[in-house]
Amino acid sequence: MKHESVLLKESINHLNIKEDGIYVDGTLGRAGHSREILKRLTSGHLYCFDIDQQAIEKSDAILKEISDNYTIIKANFIYIKEKLNELGIEKVDGILLDIGVSSPQFDNPERGFSYRYDTRLDMRMDQSQSLDAYKIVNEYAFNDLVRILRKNGEEKFAKEIARAIEKQRLISPIETTGQLVEVIKSALPAKVLSKKGHPAKQSFQALRIEVNNELENLEIATKKAIELLKPKGRCAIITFHSLEDEIVKKIFKEASSPPVIDKRIPLKADEIPLSEYQLVNRKVIVASKEELDKNRRAQSAKLRVIERR
């Protein structure tokens, strides 16, 4: 399946790009968003982050055709502030984070992200790291498996699935995505198996999040990203499930809330301090019907944008 960046027009428009500005794409992927940012820069510069070497190589070739005003940094976006500071960049005009797995990663059977293919359990975005889904499934204790499935996948049958995994690996290791799907199915009641949607979806999401430490990384990166903004600079973040969206929503809300003032202190309207940041969109932005008709993966996407005053 061809990779199509979700909420592309909305996110680019909300970044309010200046042709001489400094921008960051914290999740380069296949350069869908980076390409559009770079097109709008003349004397400005774009810094791109990714940990997937395949994505970096393909995106580099795409961006070269547009301009040389970009730098690709092979690093997790949690190091966004440190890596930019090393390059002498203290503040930026805009940051985009498109969270989650890209279509090429999902559609490459060898990466082991999808339950649609029977391949070795992997799910690593950074293929140089040692922790993968195989290790979690075959070596983590029962209580840890339950925690992962509940916290990361909101799986109601976490205990049952963890027990089934534990039982199967006593016989032999669970080596492939196909084997794991069968184990998950064996733990679920018939009424769940008959429902629309794949029965292993939540479990696979839970494992992928754990392998890549996605929720903790998102929280760290979001806080660092808004600290990097210049006045009038904007940070746009696209998430794909409620756990991610709640993290971004909470951080943005805290940053845009005015400081608490003792009500007994008499202040004029112009003396009341404002928050350092303001929400650009109070209501979350979702994909249009036109985009949903073209790209079903945009269905769960949500965009939130914050601006430094």
Image (tube, grey):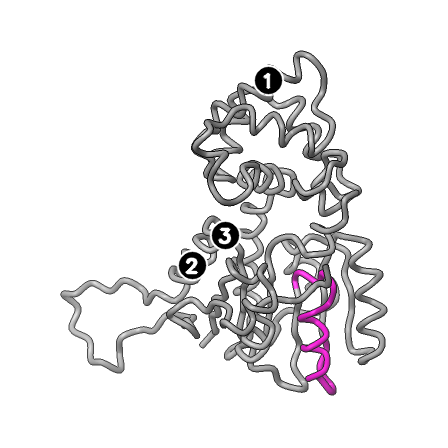
Quadrant of the snapshot with the N terminus: bottom right
Instruction: State the residue at coordinates (32%, 64%).
Output: 259
Indicate the position of residue 291 as horizontal and vertical percent values: 56, 71
Q: State if disc 3 and disc 1 touch (CB < 8 Å).
A: no
Indicate the position of residue 147 as horizontal and vertical percent values: 49, 30
Marking on residue 264: none
Name the residue that disc number 2 marks.
Answer: 249
Q: Nearer the viewer, mark 1 or mark 2?
A: 1
* Amino acid type of the residue tagged 3 in the rendering: His
* Amino acid type of the residue tagged 1 in the rendering: Glu
Name the residue that disc number 1 marks.
Answer: 166
How many neighbours does mark 1 have within 10 angstroms: few (below 14), some (14-19), or many (20 or more)?
A: many
> Was residue 43 drawn as part of the magenta stretch in this picture?
yes
Considering the numbered disc 1 on the image, is that residue within a helix, a strand or a loop? helix
Mark before the other along the chain sequence, 1 or 3: 1
Instruction: State the residue at coordinates (81%, 71%).
Output: 62
Name the residue that disc number 3 marks.
Answer: 241
- The span shown in magenta is 26-45
Instruction: State the residue at coordinates (51%, 78%).
Output: 231
Res 2 → quadrant: bottom right
